Image (cartoon, coloured by chain):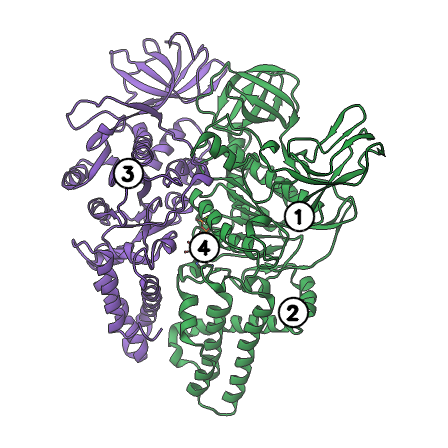
Chain colours: A green, B purple
Amino acid sequence: MNGRIIGISGPTVSVDLQGLRLYERVLVGEAGLMGEVVRLEQGRAVVQVYESTRGLAVGEPVEATGSQLTVRLGPGLLDTMFDGLQRPLAAMRQEQGPFIHPGGAAASSAAAQPPLRFVPAHKVGETVAPGELLGHVEEGELRHPVRAPEQGGAIERIAEGEVPAGEPVAVLAGGIEVSAFHDWPVRLPRPYARKLSRFEPLVTGQRCIDFLFPLARGGSAIFPGGFGTGKTLLEQSIAKFADVDIVVYVGCGERGNEMAEMLDDFSELTDPWSKRPLMSRTIVVVNTSNMPVAAREASIYTAVTMAEYYRDLGCHVLLLADSLSRWAEALREISSALEEMPGEEGYPTYLDSRMAEFFARAGVVETADGKVGSLTVLLSISPPGGDFTEPVTQACLRNTGAFFMLDTDLAHRRHFPAINWFQSFSLYEQDVSCHLEEQVAAGWGELRRETRALLQREQGLREVAEIVGTEGLQDADRLLMQVTEDVRRRFLAQNAYTEDAFSTPQQTHELIHSMIEGYRGASAQLAKGEHLEAVLRKVRPAKKQAAAAGGN
Amino acid sequence: MRLARHSYSTLRSIQGPLLFVEKVIEARMGEVVTIAFPDGREAEGEVLRIERDTVLIQVIGDSRGLDLDRTRVTFTDSIKRAPLAAEVLNRAFDGSFRPIDELPMFVPEKWAPVSGLPMNPVARERPQEMIETGFSTIDGLNTLVKGQKLPIFSCAGLPSRELAAGILEHARAKSAEGAGSVVVFVALGLAFHEYAYYRQTLERLKGDYVAFINLARDPVVERLLAPRFGLTVAEYLAFEHGRDVLVVVTDMTNYCDALREVSTAREELPGRRGYPGYLYSDLASLYERAGRIKGQPGSVTLLPVVTMPEDDITHPIPDLTGYITEGQIVLSRELHQRGVFPPVDVLPSLSRLMQRGIGKGRTREDHREIANLLYMHYATGRDLRRLEAIVGREGMSEADRRMLEFAAAFEQAIVHQGEARRGIEETLDASRALLERFELLGAA
Ligand SMILES: Nc1ncnc2c1ncn2[C@@H]1O[C@H](COP(=O)(O)OP(=O)(O)OP(=O)(O)O)[C@@H](O)[C@H]1O
Ligand SMILES: [Mg+2]
């Protein structure tokens, strides 16, 4: 079906095509730019265009595709960097050079991939029912099932061993080709048998999170913070060290140099749990802040759909997005081009429901074929002016299971990760605790309570010390402040640029345990009448470590 | 491609710099139009929005004198492009790329769209080679690297001009490979006396430069164009001639105000403080053009100057800038009042790409340690100043008094440098000496 462009406004165009459906994919203009129908009216449709509309002319052709915006799922996604529409960036670079040209770029093409390894479950001549398993494609440790299409039928041909990635793995009666890949609409959550309410810890390697605000697999967390509070570094650290099978990282409306850095770092590192190259468990989706804004809106969905695919293979998947605010702003930009009635701060009124839908894609599920997989979602938020009362943070707070508040003041003091230990929370704390008590060390919960109480008391004492100076405090209080300073500097802070960037739960426990034990011992000595200076000398850390932890 | 040029005199309305033209066939988004005034003058315009046969056009230049009946708009079928050639070097232009140095326009070797194209993230080279600015607070504590975008956050009345000029004059890439460096200077909404000041600076430069000057009295819309011309030229010199290009843009606050003015005229929904909701994306379309390409010489490094309205760092302009750039250099009124130049407050300042640019093989092995120690102890000293204000110096311990002295000495010996240029070696030596004097070096 063909039509023409009749209007252009920002990232949207109006077209005179008849018979389109909402969210149908259309090709816009001579260059065939990808777009998606976002509004239907009598006599015209409005299309959100995923590439720059600059240079488009009224009267240029528009073509309907009959399908929705989809991503291609199957083997070969790992260790790849895609744009927001799942186009492989390395291939685009080869085709177009260092800059991205609108139009032109081919979508993810299977033919460019290395051959697949197929293990059949049936022989030629056997008949398979619709949806029945035909075999697996092996990719490292992963097995991608290949199923019979809706028709089913007798097997005419079936591969074994290496298959070129562009070719079918089986052919059924009537010449029906079965591919190892399938397309899935990004806006449609993938189905599962049921959601489970299980809470296993998701170890991040960040002491402050794992100890004070633990995460659960299948849960969700947000970390809002002003600029420079360490959102990106925290996301990247977690992407490096988290105890999961697959990581999907979305650079949503952020910096290009950051992505270059990340690729550089990741390609040199190994997954601390499986000891395999880090990139072999990682998928990166990027829409930098100067790439088209509509594709930024889509990038989150592209990523979560790929993440769900791995969840359905029975993997523990972690989706990280930096930053959700840029997604929300893209939504706002499109909404305003559509001249929709604005809600709070100009965001469309459906911001909340879109977010709730997105958060609902996280969880632990029993898959259709009886496996258990999980999808955990971690999102950074960039509130304007660092003010958390803004709509995006607030909408997220209603949906998320954990909240790590990144504190500008801590960041200025170069205390990283700058997670504020008073304001942050994790709803998974209780559920995850029993696992940690079992797997790591008994007394974990008690230790946490004690640490929190100390930090709380320190806060009060610090206010007093601001007025009278530390000299004016009682000995017991000075001891406490000495210990909490140590806890802050050596335990809560973790420099992402050093060896200390990753801590196993055992190491985390050991460190805090020794600190708190030290405090108990010192308190007892003090109570026995020992001199404060002597006691302090014993609990004071080796200075070198303190300097390393406090540096930038 | 159209066969003939379209020309129309069907104006429906004129609102400030905006024209609505009706009955247009086949306009292009971003298309350049020429506007013939009733009095015979000509100006350019750009297509902003198209709704069936009605086209919204933004006039570039002065729209005074336009009328509905006799004004003619001609569509050129092309989007805004910048003329490029090596002869652009050592020339000065206005915000519409017209020479203002009394020399004739050069003959372009090629034309490139001013909006540029996004760099493919996998083609980006990680920035990690230091640019020495000659200022200790930057080189020593907030190192700038090739391909970085690092803004200077200033306040009204602070000497951001002198700092920018100092950087223009003194900056040089530490490892000067390739064809050497170029400065692209973009001035937006500049007062005339400031222009004279920068003019002298540019004339003093030993290396090559290109200047785009939009004065306060020049058309507002050119303020939106000038940085795009500057960056297009910068990309051309960097990626086709292998030059290390340092782009200094002053003042981005004037750019944002121009954007707000145009957005208001378009009757767009205002966002925070009246700036349009797409301010972030718009700023990013400029700032993100800094960078390097893998396997290619040349780099674009960007130093925008932002004057924070009401000294407020949470104001949308510095706020969104900070969300896009890789750190910030923050100037302090208090240091300025104490006669410190450059009055850089190192505590809120940060260069996020510093880590890879310093240390063994890049600057000096002890660079990181020195920077960390200076920062840590200065922060301690600054904290103690608050206590001092309450209890007085006498009420403080010997150790605390010592840290107060350290903070003061740091400001005088390291932050303050007046007119002098300091090489990185000199900065590190002076820092070492200071730390040694306070016995803070070996102890840590
Ligand atoms: N864990 C850490 N260890 C050491 N330094 C850190 C750590 N986290 C953050 N930093 C410092 O803070 C800087 C800013 O961090 P980051 O880029 O993650 O901030 P951000 O919150 O993502 O900012 P923006 O919103 O502007 O993207 C880093 O460049 C680094 O200098
Ligand atoms: Mg970030």
Q: Quadrant of the N terminus of chain A?
A: top right
Q: Would you say A320 lies left or right of B98 here? A: right
Instruction: Give residue B243's mark.
Output: 3
Report, in whole angstroms, how far the alpha carbon at label 4 lies from the one at label 2.
Answer: 31 Å
Q: Which residue in the protein does label 1 denote? A: A362
Considering every residue shown, the one lying at the far front of the view is A161
> Measured from the top left, where is residue B93 in percent x and y?
22, 29
> Mark 1, chain letter?
A
Question: Are the numbered discs 1 and 4 placed on the same chain, yes or no?
Answer: yes
The answer to whether the residue labelled 1 contacts the one labelled 2, judged by CB atoms less than 8 Å apart, is no
Q: Nearer the viewer, residue B171 or A415?
A: B171
Give whichever of B239, B142 is nearer the camera: B239
Distance (Cα) linking label 3 and label 2: 56 Å
Q: CA–CA distance between discs 1 and 4?
A: 26 Å
At 69% across and 39% down in the image, what residue appears? A189
Q: Which of the two marks, 3 or 2, is nearer to us in this view? A: 3
Q: Residue under label 4, please give it.
A: A229
Distance CA(mark 1)–CA(mark 2): 26 Å
Instruction: Give above or below for A302 relative to A498.
Output: above
Chain label for disc 2: A
* Residue B197 image-quadrant placement: top left
Between circles 3 and 4, the one closer to the viewer is 3
In the rendered view, tell whether residue A19 sits above or below residue B416. Answer: above
Residue A440 shows which numbered tag?
A: 2
From the Cβ of disc 4, is ligand 1 less than 8 Å away? Answer: yes
Say if residue B396 shows up in the picture. no
